Image (spheres, coloured by chain):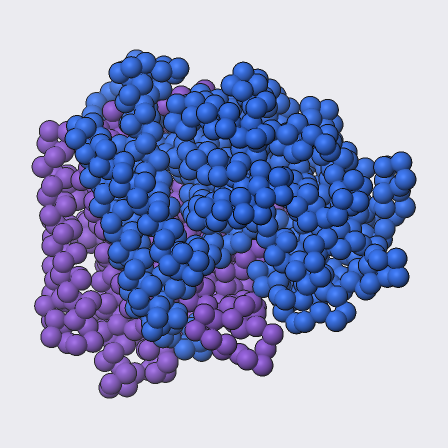
Chain colours: A blue, B purple
Amino acid sequence: MPAYKAPLRDIRFLLNEVFDYPAHYAGLPNGKDADPDTVNAILDECAKYAEEVLSPLNLSGDEEGCRFEAGKVTTPKGFKEAYEQWVAGGWQGLSHPTEYGGQGMPMSLGLMKTEMVGTANWSFGMYPGLSLGAMNTILQHASDELKTAYMPALTEGRWTGTMCLTEPQCGTDLGQVKTRAEPQSDGSYKVTGTKIFISAGEHDMAENIVHVVLARLPDAPAGTRGISLFIIPKFLPAADGSAGEFNHVVCSALEHKMGIKASATAVINFEDSKAWMIAEPNKGLEAMFTFMNTARIGTAIQGVCHAELSFQGALRYAKERRSMRALSGKKEPDKVADAIIHHADVRRMLLTQKAFAEGGRAMIYYAAQFADHMTNGIIEGDQKKYKKWDDKLGFFTPIMKGFLTEMGLEAANQGIQVFGGHGYIKEHGMEQIARDARIATLYEGTTGIQALDLLGRKVLIMTRGGAVREFTALIAKFAVDNMRNAKLRSYATALARYAAEWNVLTMRIMLTARKDRDAVSAASHHFLMYSGYVMMAYFWALQAQIAGNKLVHGGSESKEFYKAKIATARFYFDHLLPRAKGHATSMIKPSKSLTKLPIDSFVFE
Amino acid sequence: MPAYKAPLRDIRFLLNEVFDYPAHYAGLPNGKDADPDTVNAILDECAKYAEEVLSPLNLSGDEEGCRFEAGKVTTPKGFKEAYEQWVAGGWQGLSHPTEYGGQGMPMSLGLMKTEMVGTANWSFGMYPGLSLGAMNTILQHASDELKTAYMPALTEGRWTGTMCLTEPQCGTDLGQVKTRAEPQSDGSYKVTGTKIFISAGEHDMAENIVHVVLARLPDAPAGTRGISLFIIPKFLPAADGSAGEFNHVVCSALEHKMGIKASATAVINFEDSKAWMIAEPNKGLEAMFTFMNTARIGTAIQGVCHAELSFQGALRYAKERRSMRALSGKKEPDKVADAIIHHADVRRMLLTQKAFAEGGRAMIYYAAQFADHMTNGIIEGDQKKYKKWDDKLGFFTPIMKGFLTEMGLEAANQGIQVFGGHGYIKEHGMEQIARDARIATLYEGTTGIQALDLLGRKVLIMTRGGAVREFTALIAKFAVDNMRNAKLRSYATALARYAAEWNVLTMRIMLTARKDRDAVSAASHHFLMYSGYVMMAYFWALQAQIAGNKLVHGGSESKEFYKAKIATARFYFDHLLPRAKGHATSMIKPSKSLTKLPIDSFVFE
């Protein structure tokens, strides 16, 4: 397993030189404490924890996995201790309100933390990650009484949380949820049902687990309009705030998964478990989805994490492993063969990984500023502010989640490829990265669901193309501003063309969809991938522009760092962006290419 | 794990209606016995064996894996018995000479067998597959005495064989091989060295294992010109033809791999093991590579196998699993939700799998006819004939091996995607297919090596573009012949354009490479993928043409089958072939996009 080294240089380049986070934080109501020195200190500490505590447990955690015995789950060796350090370090509450014991920092700083933790050990990061989901939902929707009962222990990390949505018969289609909640005379509920795929659903690292659960009231209407949201602790909170009486929340099995094996994926049975409703009756799904955009950024980060980690491993190997001679002549004549990094095709693979990791990071750090405003809207109880920024973020999240997780998987596979046959062997850890990365395109809405959310909901229904117009205006401005700059002209030209094409394609699909409702579903995948490639192109051009300026006027990083940025931008435009052409062609093909074949004709027998 | 159902309809469509195998076999010196009735009977028997014996062991084989204890390897439960049936059925010698106990059938029939066995259980297929490699090499290069000693037991399957190339310090770069062979007074050798990644290197299914080994004579020149080829049995053949004295061939470990876990990948130590040279001294590499094209077709088939198996699993699930409603309106109003096959994007994934499985199969069945002529050249000792057909085949193998294994991996990943989160769980077997498929782009030469072999060796050096001209002439002929056919015009137009572009791109790279030797390596990946997409497009258009004719004039298959062929061809041209555009753009970008960045600037720290 590659030892993880936090890419602090790149993170600081984005924070300070590309997106001006110091100014952004200074303008946030909760940004006063996030001054550059504090931010740097937090990033350094987090990097140290990720590198020294979590990274060494990544390979062993995969080998050992979680064990399930008689309802108890044991996490791999070292996880419990690492989690204790997590709690002691106050990491869980970094971006949560001080009134519950958090540090009140902006949400974006929490995302940087998520990235470092997740790259070092994604399985470990799932436990605190799911807690964040539960904390956010409770914070936004629960009564003050419930907040007081649960938020302090969750913010401290003494308790962890989960999100219980999926049932055996339904994942995406939550209207099929069957878990039932019976009202009790004291205002509480008794919940019975089975939930599957519950990450961090049961483990040995915290004294209590707080489940946020979708269930149905007895008189609820069918479908999605009859789902309510409940809080169900494994142990009922005692008067002194500790975990009290057992609440009949039973883990009946752990799933055997392809990867993230140190993350416990539980089947959870609620057996007349005591529950409290949060949010309005039958409005559970809307409440659950309040933080959907934030949760989806959290998963989008996984694409960056696995691209980064696989790149780090592949780069080290490519400098050490010697095989054949470069086509352009011996590069290391005194050695038995040239290091494989001298082969252009190996460089293509490494640069692909680097371009996806750093390009994806730039996309996320850009959108994270919207997330800061959005969460402040929630904290301040300002629905209008929340809505405005959540809508803005809403265009980015399906692109980031859908595109970056697919690219993360590709990058992880490229890392295996750089290792050749050795990439297929467990001891190097490269194959684990691909197995761990594989989940990211599935959970929090599959890539197909992201594609429909983007094209159907965010672009066509909600904004009638406005979201694309707004973002492409940014691209077009960059193009106009830099068209006369010899070093940026080729980027500007390409971007101007793609910005125009993106709008044209959007309009064409919108017109077609009026007559053919399958057109949206048929185009959605290609539209998502096209959007991802073009959006990332903008952020690579932007990085090239800034790096070019810093090379001339001086910046905080080395000249080599800036030159590498410029070279990677060039590579991205030459070798990855052209893939958008295929998607542009395919997205406007008639939907009957997909829908015409009768179901029974698919047969293989 | 999806139960495997051999796609006999598709196989027979290709054999009888697309490529006229009856005429092909009738024209082969060793094709007399391969009359249609016999071929059908063999395919039926093989399908039955694959479906009933091998398929049920696929998931359990992965779960159990191979065990290693004190130098002994135990294959998973049921493997030994399945192998006994393999031997009893005479499957090992299907395409090998009758003088050694084989059935003397054409090589192509062996490839169809490989496909069915490999789809049902790729790990199992590795054992007889490696034997084939050893048998082919011995047959072509060993003395009559060695052939008499080894071929009968290998042809029967009583003994198995391996190919021992890789060492810890080298895989692709075999010039670095260190294993040493000391000549003995009796004309034999003593070989000492360590070989890694030896598939079927040690197991409990056969009484002896015959290793074909690359090693270096004491006075051998450095590099690839000093490698010789040896035969080293685990047990020395006794006078009665049985396995005799132990030959100090020691398995010291098994690798822990991402997939194909029921295939034993051994570290093999030769400890002064008695060996016999085959082929000329220092000409071992050429001899080893005689059958490289055949071996690479054998691996290319893996792409088809895993696309097919994953498609079968995903298709069943997509018809059963219900989620949401189709965008164009309820399809199954009496059900809680529509089956997911009604969603256009799910169809895109299923059709992608189908297109790659059936398109890849067509490519392989086409090239398999060249393999028949080529192996007949060897059997007849006709070097000229061998060379002619091996050269013809040589253009197809890197495309098939490089492109189809990448597409097999993509198809396997699409299969997971159709299952959503359930695809990530071991019990459904979909994730195993992706893990098993993952090796295919690595062994028998990585995709990068195939790309260099194709562009550098086969296209530029050996034929100066002639290989592309020859194949595109076939495409152009199809285009001209069908330009006036309303049902085929769109295919013909697209193919004509791609045929021309393929030649133009080849010429451009050839010219650039005169000044810039990195241009070949920089373009190679894109050239390979482009070639794969365009070649497969031709075979889809061809299938659409035949299917269209059969719909009008009647054929052996159902109308639904032919309609599905036509719909899949349409899908391929609309949704997969456009990817070639991106590759066409990228392959002619300056090589400095890849080579310019100094090595030290890649750093992530």
Q: Residue furthest bottom?
A: B553
Q: Using the rendered image of the protein, determine whether residue A14 is visible from the camera's viewpoint.
A: yes
> Residue B85, relative to residue B596: is it above or below?
below
Residue drawn 59% across the image and 53% down it: A289
**Residue B206 position in % (x across, y down):** 55, 50
> Residue B279, relative to residue B440: is it above or below?
above
Image-quadrant location for residue B539: bottom left
> Residue A9, relative to residue B21: is it above or below?
above
Tell whether A373 sits left or right of B580. right
Residue drawn 51% across the image and 64% down it: B313
Q: Quadrant of the N terminus of chain A?
A: top right
Residue drawn 14% across the image and 45% down it: B506
Residue drawn 40% across the image and 56% down it: A463
Tell whether A440 sits left or right of B513. right
Q: Nearer the viewer, residue B101 or A557?
A: A557
Q: Nearer the viewer, residue B298 or A164?
A: A164
**Residue B194 position in % (x across, y down):** 48, 28
Number of marks present in the image shown: 0
**Residue A202 position in % (x across, y down):** 75, 45
Q: Using the rendered image of the protein, determine whether residue A7 is visible from the camera's viewpoint.
A: no
Q: Nearer the viewer, residue B545 or A130?
A: A130
